[in-house]
Amino acid sequence: MKNTLKTRALGSVLLALLLLYACKDSFLEVPPTGSLNEDLLATPQGIEASLIAVYSQVNGRGNRMASPSNWVWGSIRGGENNKGTDPGDYSDINPIQRFEAQSTQGVISDKYNGLYEGVARANATMRILPKTDAKGSAAIEAQKVKVEAQVRFLRAHFYFELKRGFNNTPYVDESVDYQKGIELVGNDKDLWPMIEADMQFAIDNLPETWSEAGRVNSWAAKTYMAKILLYQHKFDAAKAIFDDVIANGKTTKGAKYALLPNFSDVFKASNDNSAESVWAYQSAANTGSVNNANPEFDLNWPYNTGPDGPGNCCSFFQPTIEMGNTFRTAAGLPLKNRAYDLPANELKTDMGLESKDPFTPDAGPVDPRLDHTIGRRYIQYLDWKPFPGKAWIRNQPNAGPYQTKKYVYYKTDKGTNQDNSSWTPGYTAINVNIIRFSDVLLMAAECEVEAAGGSLTKAMDYVNQVRTRAQNPADFVMGLFNAGATTDYLNPVMDYTKPAADYQIALYTAADFATAADARENIRMERKLELSGEGHRFFDLMRWSFGATPTYGIDDINAYLTYEAPKIPSGAFTGAKFTKDQDELLPIPQAQIDIQTPDILKQNPGGY
């Protein structure tokens, strides 16, 4: 069993926590809980239980839209994946992928309210801490400081998610309570200074290690601070922290940060809290509540698999055709200027074919990470079987020929790292990495390009570390489709002594990083390849839209939409377009504006 926060006994204080953290439709609608509940929790055991309630909100507590995986907000909006499934299934996501978001959409309210639920839990814990009498115990005083440091880390995280999703939203801390002025707090203040202050307190007061892997440590706080600075284009300050983290950073269990030997290892439950995991939300299966599992991917599995595959439902979050093309290589390197979308380079797919129809997979050179990221026909799908194509896709004309692969449970995980207690077997014990070390290396590489004292050589080295790991032939997906021996296309003949595709990946040379412009594009492409489907892409594109390239992200997304639209017969993307000064941010939920009035809570640009 995992030695994480979720496995700890909480005792009778849970009753008080249930009263204290009553979820409502709006973060402004939670009534005062009264001093009794806070007094009950004002003990060493109580503040730990209250802290765990804050940690537990990180995964969204069953709210798929509030999770930091950002599968909708980062990956679907970033063009890595589409909604998948049928047009009418969870149709509230359709306007999101088409950049037609409305302030009345439930999915947007879910994101907003889920994050403020985390803020509310953090603030409640902060109010309890001063009431906790240490009775002269230095150990209890030290415990209180460590609890505050963890709470402020988590509060900074919730506000970071709000900041990059909505820009400025009301900043509420422990000094403002419900029905005591909270409804008068507007969104006229920049959140960045408060986010930085909380994270700095965490840096200064968190220990390096814990006995429980689920807790955040000082190195996670430093890394997150560097990310916060990077988002503000404070490259010099971010670089200094990244230098320290890469040289000296360690996990909560004391292991030095490092890349795992195999790319595929990152997404296995057996490698939770590994040396590559800087911070992840903790997941546990078969605990009595699927909310303790990985709850927001329950829809994102292959469809109609039966016992031959994982999940059996519901074919959401399918990788885009354009994303598949991105893994095409030439001499082991990615293709530039979107040349991967040219007819001569785009990947061959089984779009429009039944699973019983003859098909031979693409034979051209590809990055080996392709087949750890995207399920495609006749390529081995984890330890289940060769992916059969349309048979495992709910609506191919609406979402394309691919299925997602990252964070999908293995056949060997059934019943242990996978939970069968709910309507779907899609709940798992696989932790979701919010920050992992390859992400750190690539963010640091960006800083080397943009900072005044940066080094293009060092940037190249960081990128090549990531690519070197991807080169490992021991991690190539095995199983080459044997077209000559296959007569029944529902039961393909495979040669498992050979790689499934022509995997070619090379390292960059000094010539590839000769200029800042070249280095910048190579790093950005590497992030797309390495982190595909992990919720970063849209936010990367938006923060890269600055300086000499203010429309960088807009141009990228519109190019993707233009390419993808004619490939999808249902018309899911026909006419879709990213509009400048509108689609960079999500609209503030109209229900929140109605509660606070437009004079206090201002809507984002976009004419919602």
Image (tube, helix red, strand yellow):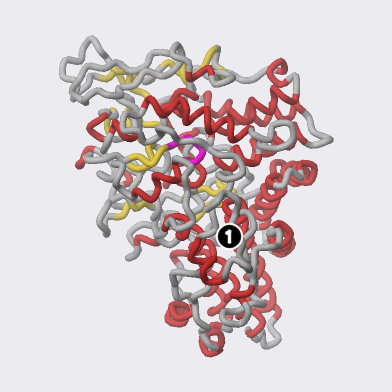
When the figure is inspected, residue 433 is found, relative to residue 383, above or below; the finding is: below
Circle 1 packing at 10 Å, graded few (<14), some (14-19), many (20+), is many
In the picture of the structure, the residue carrying the numbered disc 1 is 158
* Residue projecting furthest to the left: 488
* Residue projecting furthest to the bottom: 36
Where residue 113 sits: x, y (%)? 49, 64
Could you tell me which secondary element the residue under label 1 belongs to?
helix
Residue drawn at x 72%, y 18% as measured from the top left: 510
Query: What's under tag 1, amino acid-wise?
Result: Phe
When the figure is inspected, residue 581 is found, relative to residue 476, above or below; the finding is: below
Q: 192 and 258: which one is in front? A: 192
> In the picture, residue 14 is in which quadrant?
bottom left
Residue drawn at x 29%, y 15% as measured from the top left: 360
- Horizontal side, residue 157 vs residue 491: left or right: right
Residue numbers of the magenta segment: 76-81
Taken as a whole, is the magenta stretch helix, strand or loop? loop
Residue 69 in the magenta stretch? The answer is no
